[in-house]
Image (cartoon, rainbow, N blue to C red):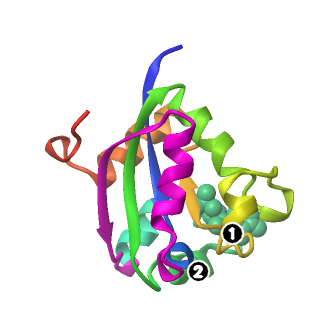
Amino acid sequence: MATERTLSIIKPDATARNITGKIVDKLESVGLRVVAQKRARWSEADAQKFYEVHKERPFYNDLVAFMTSGPIVLQVLEGDDAVAKNRAVMGATNPEEAEAGTIRAEFAENIERNSVHGSDSPENAANEIALCFSDDEIVG
Ligand code: CMP
C-alpha cells in the first residue's frame, strides 16, 4: 500500500454544530493523520473554483451558497491508501445510502449538508491540496 495524501473539508453544517472534533476522531480512528489543518470562510469565488468540475450540475449554485454560508475546516490527511480510506470512513454522498458507522451516516443532515468532502482520486487530491494549502503548511 502506498502512503498517500488526500484533501478533506469539514463543511458548514458540521462546524455550525461544533462537531469538528468528533469528525477528526473518526478520521484518526481509521489511521489517517492530519498533517495540515486550517479553519476558513470561503468567498463565492473560492467555492466556485473548488467545485468548478460540478459547474454544469443542477446543484452547483446551491452548493456554492452552502459552502460559503459558514466556516469550514480544510485538512490534508495522510496514510496508506488515504484517498480510499477517507472515502470509506466518510460514507456515501447521500447519507441515506451511507453505511452505519460512517461520518455521513452519523452526522450528515442530507445530500447537500453532508458534513464532509473528500478527494475522489489521487490525481484530484493533489490538485485540491495544491489549491488549498501551500507546501509549508503541510507538516508530515
Ligand atoms: P462533495 O463530496 O463535497 O462533492 C460535491 C457535493 O455536491 C457533494 O459532496 C454534495 O454535498 C453536493 N450535492 C448536492 N446535491 C448533490 C447531488 N444530487 N449529487 C451529488 N452531490 C450533490
Residue for point 51% across, 51% down: 25
Residue furthest to the top in view is 1
Q: Return the residue at label 2.
A: 61
Specify which label sits upstream in the sequence, 1 or 2: 2
Residue 9 % position (x, y):
47, 59
Q: CA distance from mark 1 to mark 2?
A: 20 Å
Which element is circle 1 on? loop
Query: From the viewer's perspective, is the residue at label 1 or at label 2 nearer?
Result: 1
Horizontal side of 55 relative to 71 (left or right) equals right
The residue carrying pointer 2 sits among few (fewer than 14), some (14 to 19) or many (20 or more) residues within 10 Å by Cα, namely some
Q: Residue 101: in sight, yes or no?
A: yes
Q: Residue 57: in sight, yes or no?
A: no
Q: What amino acid is found at the position of numbered circle 1 in the picture?
A: Ala
- Residue range in magenta is 15-44
Residue 45 % position (x, y):
36, 75
Q: Return the residue at label 1.
A: 108
The residue carrying pointer 1 sits among few (fewer than 14), some (14 to 19) or many (20 or more) residues within 10 Å by Cα, namely many
Place residue 1 in its image quadrant. Answer: top right
Q: Nearer the viewer, residue 50 or 138?
A: 138
Q: Is residue 1 above or below residue 21?
A: above
Residue 50 % position (x, y):
44, 61
Horizontal side of 52 relative to 104 (left or right) equals left
Which quadrant of the frame does ligand 1 lie within? bottom right
Q: What amino acid is found at the position of numbered circle 2 in the picture?
A: Asn
- On whether residue 86 falls in the magenta region, the answer is no
Residue 82 % position (x, y):
51, 32
Residue furthest to the right in view is 97
- On whether residue 19 falls in the magenta region, the answer is yes
Contact, CB < 8 Å: mark 1 with mark 2? no
Residue for point 32% across, 52% down: 131
Residue for point 31% across, 71% down: 40
